[in-house]
Image (cartoon, grey):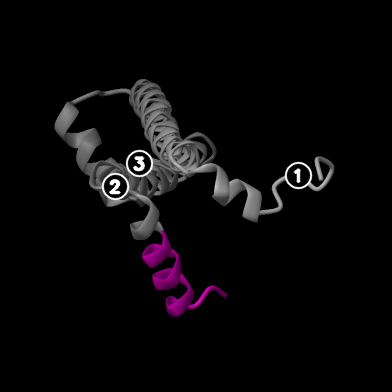
Amino acid sequence: MIGLKFIFEIRRKLNHILDDDSRKKYSLILFLSIVNAILELVGVSLLLYTILAIFEPNFIEKFHFTAYLYDSININSPQLFMLFLTAGLFLLYVIKNILLIQISKMRIRYSFAINSQVTNDYYEGLINRDLVYFNSQRFNPYIE
């Protein structure tokens, strides 16, 4: 298991190579990853609840939330209520997946921006070096 010391060491190294804007994007990527994990957990719960609603014969009476929902909506037919409930759960599942796609797009966009910043800084550092630096390093052993 990864220790806390290792995590703080990675964070220190990232703070060294990232600028302020990239650090904010990195923090946002971490936050979006947590939101992504929570939405995945909600998705599994919705899926299990839907399967339970379909296969459990006394589903409405067994669970307090569905009994309350059944009484408050005033649908007289349990089959119609189950259809309404599964359609609602399916709609929530679709909305959750749309949100996950948007979050993934944002995470990819921010990751690309961080990658661009790091590589640009690295190559600008190389470009600004003088010839003595390159002669003192072994960049390509085949040229010697």
Identity of the residue drawn at 43% across and 35% down = 120
Instruction: List x then y, in percent, for residue 89.
Output: 37, 30
Name the foreground residue: 42 vs 61. Answer: 42
Task: Look at 84% across and 42% down and name the residue there.
Answer: 142
Marks 2 and 1 sit apart, C-alpha to C-alpha, by 30 Å
Distance from the alpha carbon under mark 3 to that under mark 2: 55 Å
**In front: 130, or 15?**
130
Quarter of the rendering containing residue 21? top left
Q: Which residue is mark 1?
A: 140
Amino acid bearing label 3? Ile
Which amino acid type corresponds to the residue marked 1 in the rendered image?
Answer: Asn
Count neighbours of disc 1 (C-alpha within 10 A) and say few if under 14, some if 14 to 19, many if 20 or more: few
Q: Position of residue 72 (x, y in %)?
A: 15, 33
Q: Nearer the viewer, mark 1 or mark 3?
A: 1
Which quarter of the rendered picture does the C terminus lie within?
top right
Residue 62 lies in magenta, yes or no? Answer: no
Predominant secondary structure, magenta span: helix
User: Image quarter for residue 103?
Assistant: top left
At 41% from the left and 40% from the top, the residue drawn is 121
Q: Is residue 118 visible?
A: yes
Q: Which mark is residue 19?
A: 2
Instruction: State which region is magenta.
Output: 1-13
Say which residue label 3 marks.
Answer: 60
Q: Are marks 2 and 1 in contact (CB under 8 Å)?
A: no
Query: Residue 8, image x and y in percent?
Result: 39, 71
Dot 2: element: loop
